[in-house]
Amino acid sequence: PPPYTGVWMGDSKLCAIGVHCGNHITSHGLALNCCTDLSWFEHIVPCGLEGKGVTSLSRELGQHVAVSHVLEPFLDSFQEVFECTLVSSEDPG
């Protein structure tokens, strides 16, 4: 929920996004919880947000959702939204 970044399901974060700038280098990334062991989040304050939780696709859908099931559709959507072509270092060209 605004003003928090990421993807939320109610008061629980499903996907974290972030940007780090330092030493003239900018890095960015995201963490989409597919089948994450959420019990680890009981020991911390995730993203420093008191009173907010963490969830996963598996929890929300009530079935196991492996990263391998999500990766291709996620990358296809990323290319569509950002109008780009992704190239893997594993691609022969």
Image: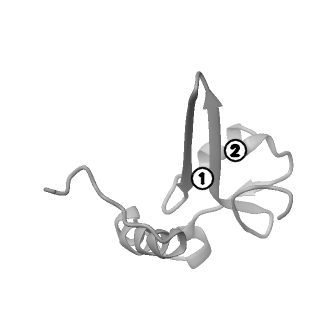
Badge 1: how crowded within 10 Å, few (<14), some, or many (20+)? few
Q: In which quarter of the view is residue 25 placed?
A: top right
Point out residue 64 in the picture as x, y percentages from the top left corner: 45, 70
Query: Pointer 2: what residue?
Result: 42
Left or right of residue 46: residue 31 = left
Tag 1 and tag 2, C-beta contact below 8 Å: yes
Amino acid carrying mark 2 in the image = Glu
Q: Label 1: state its secondary structure.
A: helix
Report the quarter where the C terminus lies.
Answer: bottom left
Residue drawn at 64 percent across, 46 percent down: 18
Q: Is residue 29 above or below residue 13?
A: above
Where is the N terminus found, in terms of image quarters?
bottom right
Residue located at (48% from left, 61% from top): 35
Q: Which residue is mark 1?
A: 38
Q: Residue at x 66, y 45 (%)?
A: 41
Side (left or right) of 76 relative to 28: left
Residue nearer the viewer, 89 or 73: 89
Residue 86 percent across, percent down from the top left: 36, 62
